[in-house]
Image: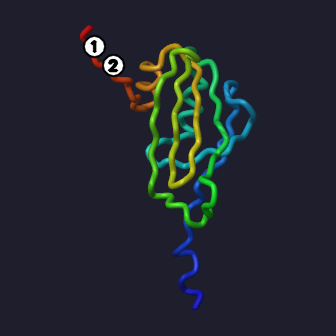
């Protein structure tokens, strides 16, 4: 009966990233696992870049009333957008019903995205209005 053991085990939805990163608040952080992003490598890379002064990971949020066991770890992705006011690139990580925001303080979002292999969402300019 125990032949099935291990087959149905889901991968952990998050991983601990610990690096000696000067720019990372705290030594170790919990980060959502998103297949297309190698977060440990990204954090290490950012630490070497002059034009990114800080990296911070937000808390991992889980939709209220949901069970971790029911989380669909295959349903995942991210979206990145730049906030001109705070001069930071926010990367929203999504996995099932779990969310986490990763923030890079930078004045060069395009350069940073190119370096890290991220695709940034560009705000479309508002439609011109005829007055």
- Tell me how many marks there are: 2
Identified at 65% across, 31% down, the residue is 56
38 left or right of 14 in image? left
The crowding category of the residue bearing disc 1, from other C-alpha atoms within 10 Å (few below 14, some 14 to 19, many at least 20), is few
Alpha carbon separation for disc pair 1 and 2: 9 Å
Q: Quadrant of residue 71?
A: bottom right
- Determine contact: label 1, label 2, CB under 8 Å: yes
Q: Quadrant of the N terminus?
A: bottom right
Q: Quadrant of the C terminus?
A: top left
| Near-viewer residue (19 or 120) | 120
Mark 1 lies on a secondary structure that is: loop
Does residue 17 sit above or below 2 in this rendering?
above
| Near-viewer residue (61 or 24) | 61
Looking at the image, the residue that sits furthest to the bottom is 1
88 left or right of 123 in image? right
126 left or right of 99 in image? left
Disc 1: which residue:
129
Identified at 39% across, 29% down, the residue is 121
Disc 2: which residue:
126
Identified at 56% across, 61% down, the residue is 11
Q: Quadrant of residue 51?
A: top right
Q: Position of residue 43 (x, y in %)?
A: 59, 33
Does residue 48 sit above or below 66 in this rendering?
above
Q: Position of residue 36 (x, y in %)?
A: 44, 44
The crowding category of the residue bearing disc 2, from other C-alpha atoms within 10 Å (few below 14, some 14 to 19, many at least 20), is few
Looking at the image, the residue that sits furthest to the front is 131
Mark 2 lies on a secondary structure that is: loop
């Amino acid at each position: 009966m125990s032949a099935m053991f291990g087959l149905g085990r889901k991968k952990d939805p998050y991983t601990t990233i610990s690096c000696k990163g000067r720019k990372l608040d705290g030594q170790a952080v919990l980060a959502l696992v998103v297949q297309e992003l190698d977060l440990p490598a990204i954090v290490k890379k950012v630490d070497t870049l002059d034009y990114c002064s800080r990296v911070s990971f937000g808390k991992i949020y889980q939709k209220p009333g949901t069970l971790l066991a029911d989380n669909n770890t295959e349903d995942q992705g991210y979206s990145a957008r730049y906030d001109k006011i705070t001069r930071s690139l926010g990367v929203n990580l999504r996995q099932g019903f779990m969310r986490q925001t990763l923030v890079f303080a930078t004045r060069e979002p395009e350069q940073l995205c190119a370096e890290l292999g991220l695709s940034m969402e560009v705000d479309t300019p508002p439609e011109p209005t005829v007055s």
